Amino acid sequence: MKLEQLKALDAVVKAGSFAKAANEILLVTQPAVTRAVQNLEAEIGFALFSREQYRPVLTPQGQAFYSQAQQILKQVESLSALSQQMAQGMEPELKVAIDTYFLLPEMLCAFHETNLEFPCTQLHISCELLGGAIGKLVEKACDLVIVPWAPEYRNQSQFLSQSLAHIQASTVVAGNFPLLQQDEPVQAEALAPYIQVVERTQEQYIRLGSSNLNPHSQRWYVNDVHLKKQIILSGRSYGFLPYHLIEQELASGQLVPFSNLEGFEVRTIELRAVVLKASPMGPVLQKLWQKLGQIEAARSRLKAASNTPLRPV
């Protein structure tokens, strides 16, 4: 069984005739196509096409065989494209790590657009505990990371970074949290009966949020943002969450900013894409880097448009 025989079979099925397959797809003589299909039939031991009709129609056995042949041809096409891409210096794979809370829809758009342009590059995306993404980069276990920009990163000369977005976050509680309606500011001591939900971090790489720990509360440690949200929604706990992850809950009142907590503030967190300066970027990573760099400007334009007052008619 030869690849040329499978290509001849595919061309006949797609063209609807041996003549069109030869003249319009394969650009060979019709006898060559007929001979390729006949040789294939002789090798596999059954007819692929019914000879009872004017146009070639697959037999039931031929249909089953052709279905499998299509998969082989697609794999060969992908392999050919991959070899051409690698010969041009394009990366066979990219590894991206993102700190758990900070995947935005615009980032996924950048991933998809890059994939459409370079479909043969396999993208590996992992979500890491806070600080875990930058740790992977330092250990050269990934090519690019997306992280909240912490003060300690600014002094790292090994990093090349670009700003992607600024997001807001604060301590939030369920809408029925008992202390939410208290008139006077809620002191840290008053939270002793309640649970502070805290995400685990890679302490050697980041200490984001450590200043928000309440020594009076019991703590529950989680490694998943959705688990953290569900625990806070249950009503006996509080914790720090980015607003873009809880838009629906904020809109419905299921979650609310714990604004009467003493020292409450809404924090603005800068998200950055980071690579190692010493690691050269291949063409695919360069394209992804370029598309990620367009996110902040696009978000700014969208925000400005949403704040533009309507003209009177």
Image (cartoon, grey):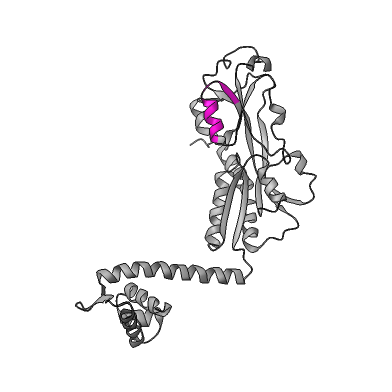
Q: Residue at x 56, y 47 (%)?
A: 106
Q: Residue 108: in sight, yes or no? A: yes
Q: Residue at x 54, y 45 (%)?
A: 105
Report x, y in % for residue 217: 65, 20
> Where the N terminus falls, by quadrant?
bottom left
Residue 185 falls left or right of residue 42? right
Residue 80 falls left or right of residue 87? left
Q: Nearer the viewer, residue 6 or 101?
A: 6
Q: Nearer the viewer, residue 179 or 214?
A: 214
In the picture shown, does residue 257 fall above or below 306? above
Report x, y in % for residue 69: 38, 70
In the picture shown, does residue 164 fall above or below 255? below
Report x, y in % for residue 288: 61, 56
In the picture shown, does residue 226 fall above or below 112? above
Q: Main secondary structure of the magenta part?
A: helix
Q: Residue at x 43, y 71 (%)?
A: 73
* Residue 166 figure quarter: top right
**Residue range highlighted in magenta:** 226-238
How many labels sit on residues? Answer: 0
Q: Residue 294: in sight, yes or no? A: no
Report x, y in % for residue 107: 58, 48
Q: Nearer the viewer, residue 181 or 34?
A: 34
Q: Residue furthest top?
A: 183
Residue 4 falls left or right of residue 298? left
Residue 43 falls left or right of residue 168? left
* Residue 198 figure quarter: top right
The answer to whether residue 182 is magenta is no
